[in-house]
Image: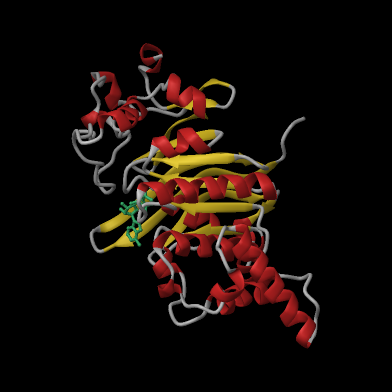
Amino acid sequence: MKKRVLLEVNALKTTFSTRAGPVTAVDGVSLTLNEGECLGVVGESGSGKSVTFASVMGLVRANGRIEEGEIRFMGRDLRAMSAEELRLVRGREIAMTMQDALTALNPSLRIDEQLAEMMEAHLDDLPVFGPARKRAIRDRSVEMLRLVGIPSPEARLQQYPHEFSGGMRQRIMIAIALACRPKLLIADEPTTALDVTIQAQVLDLISDLRRELGMSVVFITHDLGIVAEHCDRVMVMYAGQVVEEGETSEIIEQCRHPYTRALLASIPRPELRGQSLNPIPGNVPDLRDVTNECRFRSRCAYAVPACSRPVMMREIAPGRKTRCIRDGELA
Ligand SMILES: Nc1ncnc2c1ncn2[C@@H]1O[C@H](COP(=O)(O)OP(=O)(O)OP(=O)(O)O)[C@@H](O)[C@H]1O
């Protein structure tokens, strides 16, 4: 059965104005996400992953704006929506969790208050009046904490964010994000602040909830290891552009872009614990200086003079794309 498209982004371009001039953080990004699918978005810091999804959510910072492109969610044009319409889509249909749960949660409100706030703003199926409404919100809050694996949910609802460990705070942020049963969860670096065991638990939790609730998930991460374990498809970003895209197994086993290859080589392997990693030499280019040539060129072991010409994203098989003129040799 053909899956339905949930989110479609076409040729998105988002630019910030800065004192040093305009910075195009997202430059022609296109992507398609189907219902129930999990997409991993990988790339080093500054590659434009977060700005891409902030653009989708209508949450680009004040000094930035979407200059071009199309964003469709379940066929609806998000760019044409008013701020109020978009706010409703954000709580009810698309939810996002942030890198740092402590700053995303409100430190001065108890967990039950934060869950209630979310549900009051977005749930339509609550009883309209008084005690019945309160009870429904409370029952749903207990259910949500239980769903994300927080023991003694009734008691913990009364507590404040600082009374929870880092991993538990992430779970609470996920519970709040999922309280209105969104169709899409965007998890931005869900585990950077956590230790390895807790990281694995949070990622497994998101994957389990995806299956249980039938939602789609976007994992934004630096870590191809996370993607390999949890995502159906991968989009690799570099300096504001997508450079490779495909099913996870294809990307891991037969990558067709030197940047993806370098990212794969930098994955920490358990058997090499204690040894230094293989960081990619050089730095992501300054986005004010980029030209039409391949943006990875200065760091690429495969670069040839022809890489100074514009390199377009090319479909090499259905759903499989790369932005490298030497992709055939990498195969
Ligand atoms: N408010 C802003 N003002 C100016 N430039 C910005 C702003 N926000 C982002 N940028 C630019 O956009 C680039 C991409 O940022 P983005 O946060 O999307 O990267 P990322 O790939 O998500 O990195 P990270 O993994 O560190 O979150 C940044 O390097 C910066 O140059």
Query: Where is residue 140, by image quadrant?
Result: bottom right
Location of the N terminus (image quadrant): top right
Looking at the rendering, the quadrant in which ligand 1 lies is: bottom left
Please tell me which residue lies in front, 279 or 71.
Answer: 279
- Give the side of residue 267 with respect to residue 206, left or right: left
Q: Can residue 90 be seen in this view?
A: no
Please tell me which residue lies in front, 37 or 298.
Answer: 37
Location of the C terminus (image quadrant): top left
Colouring style: secondary structure
**What x and y, as percent, mark residue 43?**
37, 40
Please tell me which residue lies in front, 88 or 293.
Answer: 88
Please tell me whether residue 91 is drawn above or below residue 278 in the rendered image.
below
- Give the side of residue 122 with respect to residue 259, left or right: right
User: Which residue does the image show at 37% across and 47% down from the upper left?
Assistant: 196
Please tell me whether residue 16 is drawn above or below residue 317 in the rendered image.
below
User: Which residue does the image show at 46% across and 37% down from the upper left?
Assistant: 227
Please tell me whether residue 78 is drawn above or below residue 42 in the rendered image.
below
Q: Can residue 5 be seen in this view?
A: yes
Q: Which residue lies furthest to the top in this view?
A: 329
**What x and y, as percent, mark residue 282?**
19, 36
**What x and y, as percent, mark residue 270?**
32, 32
Q: Residue furthest bottom?
A: 130
Q: How many marks?
A: 0
User: Which residue does the image show at 50% across and 78% down from the upper left?
Assistant: 159
Please tell me whether residue 261 is drawn above or below residue 156 in the rendered image.
above
